[in-house]
Each structure stands twice: as structure tokens, then as C-alpha cells.
Amino acid sequence: KAGVTQTPRYLIKTRGQQVTLSCSPISGHRSVSWYQQTPGQGLQFLFEYFSETQRNKGNFPGRFSGRQFSNSRSEMNVSTLELGDSALYLCASSLAAATNEKLFFGSGTQLSVL
Amino acid sequence: SQQGEEDPQALSIQEGENATMNCSYKTSINNLQWYRQNSGRGLVHLILIRSNEREKHSGRLRVTLDTSKKSSSLLITASRAADTASYFCATGTVRSGGYQKVTFGTGTKLQVIP
């Protein structure tokens, strides 16, 4: 079974631009969560999608958005990039985010904003 | 926001020694999970302990959970150079819709010196 796939692996953007990151979960997994990881803040929860619906959202500005498609693949978008958005963005999938389920992570997308 | 705080932030030991990492959290949980991250990569699930369990073993890993103190510890016995990584605790809490939200701590960076 293929793991969680995130593309692209690296991105370099400039301030003010927008960016779209992609995540393909493990086959059969319907829940996809996104996290932002920075050296100073650790892993911060962005949002979680299940069956194309956002069920949970973290404390991030509206510039951060996401969506999930019918095949469970998910994208997240960051508009009007700021220097502080430079981070490793991690996607994780699980069957349904049910109680006591573990998360399976992709390798992440390293975003650098110049 | 972070649910878990890990201690120490960094740990350096000799190969063959045991490594102990601690995690404290703030609110009631359904489970506590430990993950491992090699530099700049995705996280890998190590072990999950439910709120009604006190201790769990998996290979060289031993996890304890004290819900009265809202704390957990991860013990890696007979450490190897390949154990060098960052270790994160994560709390699983159930939302009103019945699904789980997983919130990560700040991590402990472990270095095992050959």
C-alpha cells in the first residue's frame, strides 16, 4: 500500500504570492489533517477534512484554506504569503479520525518565502 | 496551541544507554501517542496508550501514562545511533462530532552518540 504522498517536496515563493500544496492519503483513508511545523512553534494544527467537509480548524488566519476532493485527496492554499509562512507543511491521513486512530504522515512540503 | 510540553527539549546520550522523555498536557484526553521524526521528514507513529491504560510496551519502547498528573513518559532502552531523531507526544481528544483531534507537543530532540 502506498503511503501518504505530498507534492511538491520543496517550494520557494516570494512575499505576496500564493501557493497550493497537495496531499494524497493512503488508499481507503478518508480523513486528512494538515499541520504547520516551524522550529519555534512545533507542529500547529491547521485543519482536518473528512468526506470533503472541513470538520476542524486551527487558529490560523483566513489566508490559509483547504479542500478535499471526492477521492480524498486534499489541497491546502496559502494566499498573500508572508515571511512567517516559511515552514514544513505536513499532511496526515487516517481512516476516519475515529477515537484511538493513529496518523500516517507524508514527508511534507518545505515552503520557503523570500 | 500546544497541548503537550516535552521535557527535555534536547537529550544527548551514548549508544547503549536508556533515553527518557517526558510529556505533560493540560486537558482531559482519550489517548496519548508518541511519534518520531527524522530530520526534515514526516512523523512516524510509535505507540498509542489509551487513557485507561497505565503502561505499554513495544520492542525497546516503554510508555507510561499518569492521567492524574497529566503526564506521560517514553523510555527507549539500549539506544542505538539510528534512534537519533525528534520525538513528539500527541494527545488525542474526541470532539463533539465523535471524531478525534490530535494535538502535538513541542518535541524532544534525541542524539545518540555511537
Image (cartoon, coloured by chain):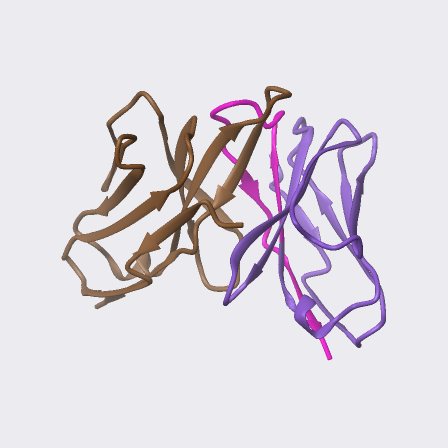
- Which of A60 and B91 lies nearest the eye of the viewer? A60
Relative side of B75 to A37, left or right: left
Quadrant of the drawing holding the C terminus of chain B = bottom left
Chain in brown colour:
B
Residue B56 lies, with reference to residue B60, above or below; the image says: above
Relative image position of residue A97 (x, y in whole percent): 59, 28
Provide the residue span drawn in magenta. Answer: A90-114
- Which of A16 and A10 lies nearest the eye of the viewer? A16
Would residue B58 be seen by someone viewing this image from the given angle?
A: no
- Which of B7 and B86 lies nearest the eye of the viewer? B7
Residue at (78% x, 45% y) in the render: A66
Q: Colour of chain A?
A: purple
Residue at (76% x, 33% y) in the render: A72
Residue at (41% x, 47% y) in the render: B4
Outermost residue to the bottom: A114
Relative side of B81 to A102, left or right: left
- Which of A2 and B108 lies nearest the eye of the viewer? B108
The count of marks equals 0
Relative image position of residue B49 (x, y in whole percent): 34, 29
Residue A9 lies, with reference to residue A58, above or below; the image says: below
Relative image position of residue A113 (x, y in whole percent): 72, 74
Would residue A106 be seen by someone viewing this image from the given angle?
A: yes
Residue A17 lies, with reference to residue B101, above or below; the image says: below
Residue at (85% x, 70% y) in the render: A17
Task: Determine if the magenta segment contains residue A98.
Answer: yes
User: Within the image, what quadrant is residue B80 found in?
Assistant: bottom left
Task: Determine if the magenta segment contains residue A70.
Answer: no
Relative side of B110 to B96, left or right: left
